[in-house]
């Protein structure tokens, strides 16, 4: 006050002070401080393990009731090498000189860890920076405070780090952590530790996100709530195909995600064919019913859904087969005979080697009657130009008349077994010319009515549909076609692993034909059965994009080994929250929450919601 007359001393008024700056800070004790109603303590990490697990930071970063701060200081290469060798030398010297066993152990460990760090830097050319991590614990009362401190200490030591309470430095530490101050030198001096920059960023498995392909569509949000924009057709170094696998326990949200992808793809002009064993896709078929965009087909012998297994179709060739076909000119008939071999092995598992040989002989004779020989090109042939099951049956009956005595019993058995498919109950499924038309943009094969049929018939028809799908996929290399195989485990048959190898080869070839295969299954263990593993494992492994929903028990173990999960990824999948999954696209892993607008869920026919 300029005027001396009005000069007076203002007393401390805590009420006014609290009203102006309500957060009272009191740093009196050495190892804690009070901030408003909170009891607080700030720790710093003093030691990091030489190698960290992917995702390690997220564990210490997400502890309830804490604020975590990281500062990083770049270091120049020459500097760091000198510094590291000094640390190693002095730690080794101290280890040798001390008599205290614990101290010796600690110093030796410091020297070893630092040597390892230096090796990573020198050999792998890794960038190193100094990182300082401080953790502030905030407790509501004494008990809460103690519990939180214990929790922090145990979590931090769980990731292999060593924590120290910044005793006598709580005020500096608070300023260091506070956003309104610059990093405090004293705290940096105490807490700075050299670490490979990659080890630090790899510490945030689901937090470095922002998955955005630029074009494509919305799939959901990541852990931070950032939208994920996905382009099924994007190819880059690590995304070499457009296939996807969707794995997870029952009711976790696999089909809902696939349906959302299908609708988004249809809008972008992709052709989609679905093999639907549980009538789950009828709702989206109804959505696109107008103008003939979609067709729903009862795959159990419906009038317009017949797919003649004897109609020669292309086969997805493995690399060796392709080479062989090119060099030796293997014909379409020869390749189709291989497909039929799988078809009949699935349908009639009891066939003996002799019976199979007789069947092949009859097939060749039957095709010859229709002027289809090893040289025939079927490209311009109509559906009705091909033989049907009755023709096979009749050929067998004819051949039986002149058969050698040694094989008449086998021929009789074969004829008997084929009666069902020709004149018996199964004729509605397979005895007829193909009536299935491929002009709709969305085709759904519903195999629900097969529930009452035998497993053998179910997997045979699944296979028959799959081979038709491949024909559609490979017909035009430039047309984008997505084939969805839900409940794909139905195709697993340990006695006929070739069915799975067909699916695997379809996945392999799809890449070259603008094709995408989406395989969904809740059954992982079956895919790893030693009898089928060779073909079945790649079916889940080959796709560049994988969505892994909640699993438990043996399935969790299997999927964890299959995809080489880190602890954090395993925990996410084990948590098993509905509509949440681990998304792996190329080299990236992130948590995907399939959060869809109400309107879209309704369109997909999803009831209940989360
Ligand atoms: N993204 C989502 N948003 C809201 N609700 C969902 C979502 N995903 C799944 N649900 C709910 O969970 C139910 C089961 O989902 P869905 O049929 O997709 O599971 P699934 O994994 O295919 O199961 P199954 O293996 O038995 O076929 C849905 O009917 C719906 O109520
Ligand atoms: Mg499902």
Image (spheres, rainbow, N blue to C red):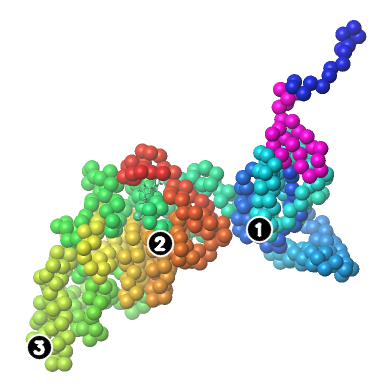
Check the image and name the residue furthest to the top: 5
Q: For residue 29: magenta?
A: yes
Question: Which quadrant of the structure image shows residue 65?
Answer: top right
Residue 571: percent from left, percent from top = 53, 56
Residue segment shown in magenta? 17-40
- SS at badge 3: loop
| Residue 433 vertical placement versus 186 (above, below) | below
Q: Which of 583 and 543 is in front in this view?
A: 583
Check the image and name the residue furthest to the front: 143
Residue occupied by mark 2: 511
Q: How crowded is mark 3: few (under 14 residues within 10 Å), some or many (20 or more)?
A: few
For the point 34% across and 63% down, the residue is 488
Residue 249: percent from left, percent from top = 41, 58
Residue 520: percent from left, percent from top = 37, 59
Residue occupied by mark 3: 402
Q: How crowded is mark 2: few (under 14 residues within 10 Å), some or many (20 or more)?
A: some
The earlier-in-sequence mark between 3 and 1 is: 1
For the point 57% across and 60% down, the residue is 567
| Foreground disc of the pair 3, 1 | 1
Residue occupied by mark 1: 158
For the point 63% across and 60% down, the residue is 53
Quadrant occupied by the N terminus = top right
Left or right: 340 as drawn, with respect to 326:
left
Quadrant occupied by the C terminus = top left
Taking the image as drawn, is residue 198 in sight? no
- SS at badge 2: helix
Taking the image as drawn, is residue 245 in sight? yes
Per the model, the C-alpha gap separating discs 2 and 3 is 48 Å
The earlier-in-sequence mark between 2 and 1 is: 1
């Amino acid at each position: 006050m300029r005027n001396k007359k009005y000069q007076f001393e203002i007393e401390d008024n805590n009420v006014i002070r609290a009203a102006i700056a309500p957060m009272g800070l009191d740093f009196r004790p050495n190892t804690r401080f009070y901030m408003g109603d909170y009891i607080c303590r700030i720790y710093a990490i003093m030691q990091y393990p030489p190698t960290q697990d992917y995702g390690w930071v997220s564990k210490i970063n997400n502890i309830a009731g804490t604020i975590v701060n990281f500062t990083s200081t770049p270091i120049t290469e020459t500097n760091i090498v000198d510094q590291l060798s000094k640390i190693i030398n002095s730690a080794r010297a101290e280890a040798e000189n001390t008599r205290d066993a614990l101290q010796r152990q600690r110093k030796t460990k410091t020297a070893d860890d630092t040597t390892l760090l230096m090796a990573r830097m020198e050999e792998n050319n890794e960038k190193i920076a100094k990182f300082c991590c401080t953790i502030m614990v905030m407790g509501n009362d004494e008990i809460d405070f103690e519990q939180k401190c214990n929790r922090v200490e145990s979590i931090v030591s769980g990731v292999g780090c060593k924590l120290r309470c910044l005793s006598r430095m709580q005020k500096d530490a608070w300023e260091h952590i506070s956003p309104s101050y610059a990093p405090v030198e004293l705290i940096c001096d105490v807490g700075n530790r050299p670490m490979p920059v990659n080890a630090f960023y790899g510490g945030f498995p689901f937090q470095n996100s922002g998955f955005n392909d630029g074009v494509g569509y919305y799939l959901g949000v990541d852990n931070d709530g950032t939208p994920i924009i996905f382009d099924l057709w994007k190819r880059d170094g690590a995304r070499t195909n457009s296939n996807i696998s969707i794995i997870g326990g029952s009711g976790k949200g696999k089909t809902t995600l696939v349906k959302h992808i299908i609708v988004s793809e249809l809008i972008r002009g992709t052709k989609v064919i679905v093999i639907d064993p549980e009538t789950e896709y009828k709702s989206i078929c109804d959505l696109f019913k107008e103008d003939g965009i979609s067709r729903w087909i009862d795959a159990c012998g419906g009038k317009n859904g017949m797919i003649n297994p004897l109609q020669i179709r292309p086969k997805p060739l493995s690399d060796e087969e392709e080479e062989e076909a090119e060099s030796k000119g293997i014909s379409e008939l020869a390749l189709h005979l291989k497909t039929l071999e799988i078809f009949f092995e699935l349908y009639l598992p009891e066939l003996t080697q002799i019976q199979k040989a007789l069947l092949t002989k009859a097939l060749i004779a039957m095709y010859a009657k229709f002027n289809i020989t090893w040289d025939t090109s079927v490209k311009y042939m109509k559906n009705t130009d091909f033989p049907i099951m009755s023709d096979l049956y009749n050929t067998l009956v004819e051949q039986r008349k002149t058969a050698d005595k040694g094989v008449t019993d086998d021929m009789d058995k074969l004829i008997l077994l084929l009666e069902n498919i020709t004149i018996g109950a199964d004729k509605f499924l397979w005895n007829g010319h193909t009536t299935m038309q491929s002009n709709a943009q969305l085709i759904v094969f519903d195999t629900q009515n097969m529930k009452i049929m035998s497993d053998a018939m179910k997997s045979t028809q699944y296979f028959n549909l799959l081979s038709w799908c491949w024909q559609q996929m490979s017909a035009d290399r430039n047309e984008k076609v997505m084939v969805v195989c839900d409940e794909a485990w139905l195709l697993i048959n340990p006695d006929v692993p070739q069915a799975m190898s067909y699916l695997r080869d379809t996945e392999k070839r799809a890449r070259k034909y603008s094709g995408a295969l989406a395989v969904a299954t809740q059954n992982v263990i079956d895919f790893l059965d030693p009898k089928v593993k060779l073909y079945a494992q790649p079916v889940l492994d080959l796709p560049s994009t994988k969505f892994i929903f909640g699993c438990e028990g043996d399935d969790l173990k299997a999927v964890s080994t299959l995809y080489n999960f880190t602890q954090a990824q395993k925990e996410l999948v084990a948590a098993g929250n509905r509509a949440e999954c681990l998304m792996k696209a190329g080299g990236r892993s992130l948590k995907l929450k399939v959060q869809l607008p109400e309107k879209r869920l309704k369109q997909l026919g999803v009831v209940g919601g989360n």
